[in-house]
Amino acid sequence: DTAVSQTPKYLVTQMGNDKSIKCEQNLGHDTMYWYKQDSKKFLKIMFSYNNKELIINETVPNRFSPKSPDKAHLNLHINSLELGDSAVYFCASSDRGALGNQPQHFGDGTRLSIL
Amino acid sequence: SQQGEEDPQALSIQEGENATMNCSYKTSINNLQWYRQNSGRGLVHLILIRSNEREKHSGRLRVTLDTSKKSSSLLITASRAADTASYFCATDQAGTALIFGKGTTLSVSS
């Protein structure tokens, strides 16, 4: 059983399009995250939700909008895709505690390529 | 701003040798974590060490933390080809998210 699953695994699309990435975790965690990993493998937090409430919102263009329908799901919608959005997007989850003091469990990523 | 910096950026060793990776950070932390990322996969948590701990072990992994030097090291003993991956340290800044370093790419050849 996959603990944190993301769909799709690959996403190839044209500049200007709108796309969504879905994430689900079956670990019973109450905190979920979106990260962006660039071509140099640098991993940066984008958003974090705890029990459907946004708790971290880093400096991310407002073209990116996360949505958490329940604590097991965190989706990411991206409007007007740009070339610079090409990256691997990772979803992760953890138990709540003070942020950073719990192991995080990652999905296998969504590889987004903008043509 | 980036919190952790791993060193070296890349490391190539033979099976059976030990691999040591270092992580330096800039501000005070409560916890430091190490993760592994195999090619094309997500990150896998390895060890979490708290600021009041100096050393932690898990199987062939040994992590040390020196808060006075703001540095940590990850030692993998008796490396195997399956240890080939990128290794990241991640630190918390109290009350905020984990901040990851750029990683060390380890290649273990048989």
Image (cartoon, coloured by chain):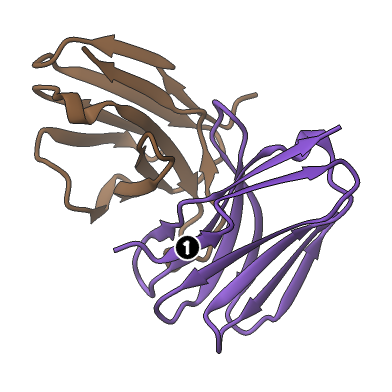
Chain colours: A brown, B purple
For residue B94, above or below residue A61 = below
Q: Which of the 4 image quarters holds residue A80?
A: top left
Q: Is residue A103 left or right of residue A35?
A: right
For residue B91, above or below residue A94 = below
Q: In the rendered view of the protein, which quadrant contains the C terminus of chain A? A: top left
Helix, strand or loop at label 1? It is: strand
Question: Residue B77: percent from the left, percent from the top?
Answer: 85, 55
Res. B3 in view:
yes
Question: Residue A23: percent from the left, percent from the top?
Answer: 40, 28
Q: Which of the 4 image quarters holds residue B42?
A: top right
Question: Residue A22: percent from the left, percent from the top?
Answer: 35, 24
Q: Residue at coordinates 26% horizontally, 50% vertically from top-left?
A: A53
Q: Residue at coordinates 22% horizontally, 53% vertically from top-left?
A: A58
For residue B69, above or below residue B95 = below
* Residue tagged 1: B5
Q: Residue furthest bottom?
A: B68
Res. A8 in view:
no
The kind of residue on which mark 1 rests is Glu
For residue B20, above or below residue B41 = below
Q: Badge 1 local density, few (<14 within 10 Å), some, or many (20+)?
A: many
Q: In the rendered view of the protein, which quadrant contains the N terminus of chain A? A: top right
For mark 1, name the chain. Answer: B
Observer-nearest of A71 and A55 = A55
Q: Is residue B94 left or right of residue B67?
A: left
Q: Residue at coordinates 80% horizontally, 65% vertically from top-left?
A: B57
Observer-nearest of A30 and A13 = A13
Q: Residue at coordinates 46% horizontally, 56% vertically from top-left?
A: B101
